[in-house]
Structures are given as C-alpha cells and as structure tokens.
Image (cartoon, grey):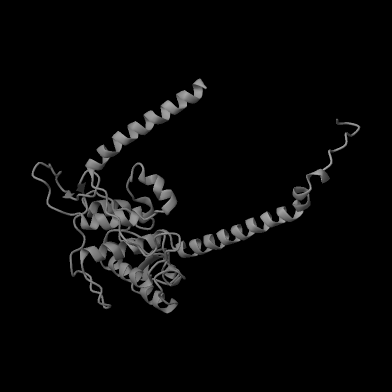
C-alpha cells in the first residue's frame, strides 16, 4: 500500500512540474495555429491538385536551397500522390540535371534526369552549401513534415491519441512561412538572422522565402503566402509519407475484419455454451484421475 501511495504521489508531482513547464516553453515561440488539411483524420486523403501546386512551389522556390534526396521522379506518378502521369513525371525529370558517371574517361558528367532518378541536391556537398549560405546548412525536405513539429502540451497530447492528430509538421511549416514579422523593440535579433514568431527562439537564419504573387497558379487558387504555405506543407507531408492513403485504407479494412471476427467469435461462443447456460446441471464435475485429484 505504501509503494502504491508513493507512486501516485510521484505521478501527481510529475504532472504538476509538466504543467508549470509547458507555459514557459510556450512563451518562447507561439504555438502554430491548427489548419484544415484534406489528409487529416482516419479517412483523410491527399488532394492531388494541392500536391501539384505544392510541388510547383518547391521547384520554383525551395529547391534552390533544400534537397529532396529520398524522393524519386517516378514517385510523382504513384497512386495517392500528385497525380502526374508517367510521361509527365519523365518530362519533369528531364528538366533537371543529374550527376552521373564515371564515363569512359573516368570523369563525372551531367545529364538530363530520368524517371528512375532521385531529385538531385542543389549543392554538390554540405561544405558547398555552407559556403554559399553563410555557414548555414538547409535541412533536407524529404522527411521534414514528419521530423518537425511542436509540443502541444498537457492535456492536448492525450486528446491527439484519440483524434489521430498527426498534422503538427504541416502546421509548423505553414506557420513558419507566415510567421515573419518585425521584431519587438525589446528583442535583440542576432546578426544574420530574421525574426519569426513561430520559430523557437524567434531568430531564424532563413530569410523570408516567398511573397504574395511570387508563384503563378493556373487554376485560380489565391497566390498568397498563406495559400503557398498550405500547398507546400501538404506536398512535403506527402513526400514524408507517400503511402498515407494506402495505409489508412488498409487500416480501415483491418478494423472491419476485426469487428466481423469479434462478432463471429461471440456468436460461436454463445452457440457452443448455449445448453450449459440453460441447464447448469448438465455440467458434471470432472472425475479425479490416477495422477491428479
């Protein structure tokens, strides 16, 4: 009893410490506002048109600094993705220059990309990237939407387990792109950084990458930073988890199977033990055996 009481006391103290620590962290950077995503929830799916717009933003803006090394051009035509055909994906690949080789002379060379190639990085190596960007190394965007996020704190992380909230990464990316502002008068901004109200510490090395009207859409979608943030965040979510639609579909099928199986097991049990439940006297005690009594 004493150990149980000590355990409960420790849990209460831990919850109290967590409750006081979370507001302190929230003061460092504002929590990104929750956005509405087509892929949210157990039945959500990617919007192919939004993914195509997001890819356009990545290609015209983000790809100058950020790599996408885990994604190949053929993935653009996979089911559940942006919806490009194989021919369109091959045409997109041909617009990129890919390093290949060595050739017969032992030299590396540049050639147009093929659909089987992976997206080439914007810099030859990390040292070149640091030298070109003042010492900073832009993160690879292949899994950025799954690697980035923010602490929702207590009790929200408990609710997230039931609502299946997994959109912290896209919410964070959208917030960062929309979080650039003038620093407060009492904020000492380090040299070479920019103020962002959603970035931890508020000082981010990346300058504001996109402005209203910078990327042109042909489907009438608003050309605003808010919309750009939504579209590129959705595309990066797909790049991080391209099989999300398939995973959710399989999960739903498994749940249906388990529900049907549970019902069959229940009625099988009722059928087998029906007579015993009606006539308990039919269940005779087991006779003792030679080796067990």
Q: Is residue 140 visible?
A: no
| Residue in the picture at 25% in, 73% down | 221
| Residue in the picture at 23% in, 74% down | 216
Q: Is residue 291 above or below residue 134?
A: above
Q: Is residue 289 above or below residue 56?
A: above
Percent x, y for residue 184? 11, 46
* Quadrant of the rendering where the C terminus is positioned: top right
Q: Is residue 120 above or below residue 265?
A: below
Given the current orientation, which residue lies at the most extreme right position?
A: 290
Given the current orientation, which residue lies at the most extreme left position?
A: 185
| Residue in the picture at 38% in, 77% down | 91
Figure quadrant of residue 265 = bottom right
Given the current orientation, which residue lies at the most extreme top position?
A: 2
Figure quadrant of residue 242 = bottom left
| Residue in the picture at 20% in, 67% down | 224
Q: Is residue 16 visible?
A: yes
Percent x, y for residue 88? 39, 77
Percent x, y for residue 63? 29, 63
| Residue nearer the viewer, 73 or 112 | 73
């Amino acid at each position: 009893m004493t150990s149980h009481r000590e355990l409960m006391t420790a849990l209460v103290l831990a919850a109290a410490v967590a409750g006081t620590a979370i507001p302190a962290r929230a003061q460092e950077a504002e929590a990104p506002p929750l956005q509405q995503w087509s892929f949210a929830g157990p039945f959500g799916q990617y919007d192919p048109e939004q993914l195509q717009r997001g890819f356009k933003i990545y290609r015209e803006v983000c790809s100058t600094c950020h790599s996408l090394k885990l994604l190949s051009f053929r993935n653009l035509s996979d089911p559940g993705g942006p919806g490009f055909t194989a021919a369109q994906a091959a045409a997109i690949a041909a617009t990129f220059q890919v390093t290949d080789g060595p050739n017969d002379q032992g030299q590396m060379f540049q050639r147009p990309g093929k659909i089987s190639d992976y997206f080439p990085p914007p810099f030859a190596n990390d040292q070149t990237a640091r030298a070109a960007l003042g010492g900073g190394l832009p993160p690879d965007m292949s899994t950025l939407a799954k690697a980035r996020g923010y602490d929702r704190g207590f009790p929200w992380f408990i609710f997230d387990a039931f609502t299946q909230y997994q959109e912290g990464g896209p919410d964070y990316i959208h917030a960062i792109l929309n979080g650039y502002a003038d620093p407060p008068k009492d904020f000492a901004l380090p040299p070479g950084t920019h103020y962002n109200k959603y970035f931890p510490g508020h000082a981010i090395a990346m300058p504001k990458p996109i402005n209203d009207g910078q990327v042109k859409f042909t489907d009438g979608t608003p050309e605003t930073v808010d919309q750009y943030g939504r579209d590129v965040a959705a595309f990066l979510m797909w790049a991080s988890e391209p099989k999300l639609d398939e995973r959710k579909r399989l999960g739903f099928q498994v749940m249906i199977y388990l529900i049907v199986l549970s019902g069959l097991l229940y009625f099988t049990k009722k059928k087998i033990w029906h007579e015993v439940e009606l006539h308990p006297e039919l269940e005779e005690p087991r006779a003792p055996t030679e080796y067990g009594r």
